[in-house]
Amino acid sequence: MSEVFNALLSMEGVRDAADRAREACTQLRWHAALRRRIPEAAAESRVRGARATALLEGVEVDHTTVRDLLRGALDWPLEPDPWELTLRGAVQVTAATEASTGAVLLQDLVRLQIAAAAPVSTPDELGRPRADDETCDELATLGQAPPADEALQRLRDVLALLDASNLPAPLAGALLHAEIAVARPFTRGNGLVARAAHRGYLRTSGLDPTGVAVIEAGYAAKGSADYLGALTAYAQGGTEGVRLWLIHSADAVVAAAAEGNRICDAVLAGRLS
């Protein structure tokens, strides 16, 4: 695998982008708010992450609403519309990342898929990868989803890579995110799962051990068109497309850490909003 890692790091701009991402997360870790108030800052990170991942699904909602939904101060509608169902999946899957520990395993992604897709799926679609006779219509701009067996193998391959490699965490997280989004191993919820898995990996890999960086906001900062464009470049399979995605993702980590710093500033000032 070392040849793969060296090839990725030798792409123009990739190593520098990964270094910038790591430095941004290191600076976040030293914020004064994280000496004593990590739980408060991490909780607000999940609020902003849920809002941003919903935005990337086409649902716009304010921070206060998401915050109240996450802490149970606001009930979900009894007869939700499609946008509210999507928002519920975004909130549930982001909340579920709090339980992420250690190496990323297939069962961890299945757990995230249950959280993400439960509001919009039938029970038999939950908690398992796609069957051979099932397709996925999500993220159509990336092209047709691969067959179920290929999608599952791609997922297993990237998980094995993460487990065996010393690839810099910003790049490993980018590959995990892209492979879930492009392979679409589940019938529903793949985009939400990809971003939630990336959030969990940033924390468990030690890049963002406090869980305060907001990777979803990092991607949303440039807008869904840029996000989907970078994923599409990766999906096309060429070296240049992979390079563009890795740099785009590393830049998103830098933006995620910047959002984490804003959270920490607000925590210290006592004015979360």
Image: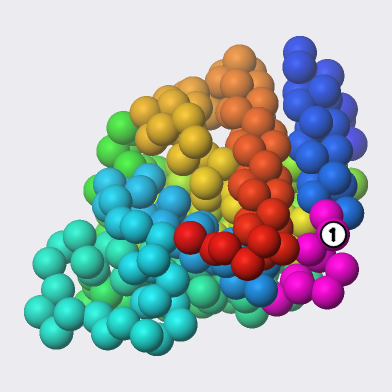
Q: Position of residue 249 (x, y in %)?
A: 62, 35
Identify the secondary structure beneath mark 1: helix
Q: Is residue 82 magenta?
A: no
Q: Is residue 35 magenta?
A: yes
Q: Residue at x 87, y 68 (%)?
A: 35
* Residue 200, horizontal then vertical, whole percent: 65, 63
State the predominant SS element of the stretch in magenta: helix
In this orientation, which residue lies closer to the viewer: 113 or 23? 23
In which quarter of the view is residue 24 placed? top right
Amino acid on which the number 1 mark rests in the picture: Ala
The residue depicted at 85 percent of the width and 32 percent of the height is 19
Q: Nearer the viewer, residue 264 or 20?
A: 264
Horizontally, is 9 left or right of 217 in the view? right
State which quarter of the image contains the N terminus. top right
Image position of 131 with respect to 245: above or below: below
264 to 237, vertically: above or below? below
Residue at 27% of width from left, 74% of height from top?
119
Q: Which residue is mark 1?
A: 32
Magenta residues? 31-39
Q: Position of residue 264 (x, y in %)?
A: 70, 58
Q: Between 13 and 25, which is closer to the camera in this rendering? A: 25
Residue neighbourhood size for the residue with mark 1, other residues' Cα within 10 Å, grouped as few (<14), some (14–19), many (≥20): few
Is residue 140 toward the left or the right of residue 152 in the image? left
Residue 175, image x, y percentages: 64, 42
State left or right for residue 49 relative to residue 18: left
Q: Is residue 179 left or right of residue 73?
A: right
Answer above or below: position of 114 versus 78. above
